[in-house]
Image: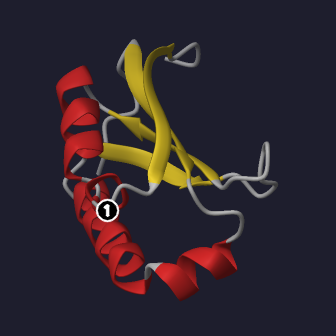
Amino acid sequence: MPDLNQATYFVAFFTTAFASMEDVRREAPEALQRHLERTRRLHAEGTVLMAGAFLEPKGGAISTMTVLASREAAEEFVRGDPFVELGKVAHHEIREWNNMLR
């Protein structure tokens, strides 16, 4: 179970090359499956605290965010993501995030 008492976490934001989840399922079903399996495994290991796609595409593209326990974990998450490897992430950003409820 992830530790929710850290002072800071790191959020990886992705802007994909997909306009909808239907496009993702149609154009990259294997990458989606690998992405979900990997993210769930990292969550079970305590590296990923939460993750998901925003419900309303911004600028016509699916965007996601993943909250991770460390900068190193966030950088590795980005490097090893199947959509990044496939060239389907148009932009990504890692930002430090303060846990005010700690």
Which residue is at 56% across, 75% downward? 24
According to the picture, the residue beneath numbered tag 1 turns out to be 86
- Residue 95 in percent (x, y) is at 45, 18
**Colour setting:** secondary structure
Q: Is residue 21 above or below residue 56?
A: below
Relative placement, left or right, of 36 versus 102 is: left
Residue 47 seen in the current view: no
Q: Is residue 37 above or below residue 25?
A: above
Q: Is residue 75 above or below residue 97?
A: below
Q: Amino acid at mark 1?
A: Leu
Residue 85 seen in the current view: yes
Q: Is residue 35 above or below residue 22?
A: above
- Residue 78 in percent (x, y) is at 29, 41
- Residue 102 in percent (x, y) is at 49, 17
Location of residue 47 (image quadrant): top left
Which residue is at 29% across, 74% downward? 34
Relative placement, left or right, of 94 versus 45 is: right
Location of residue 52 (image quadrant): bottom right
Which residue is at 63% across, 77% downward? 23
Q: How many other residues sit within 10 Å of disc 1, few (<14), some (14-19) or many (≥20)?
A: few
- Residue 22 in percent (x, y) is at 67, 81
SS state under label 1: loop
**Number of marks in the image?**
1
Q: Nearer the viewer, residue 76 or 83?
A: 83
Q: Nearer the viewer, residue 66 or 87?
A: 87
Which residue is at 26% across, 65% downward? 38
Location of residue 11 (image quadrant): top left
Relative placement, left or right, of 27 versus 70 is: right
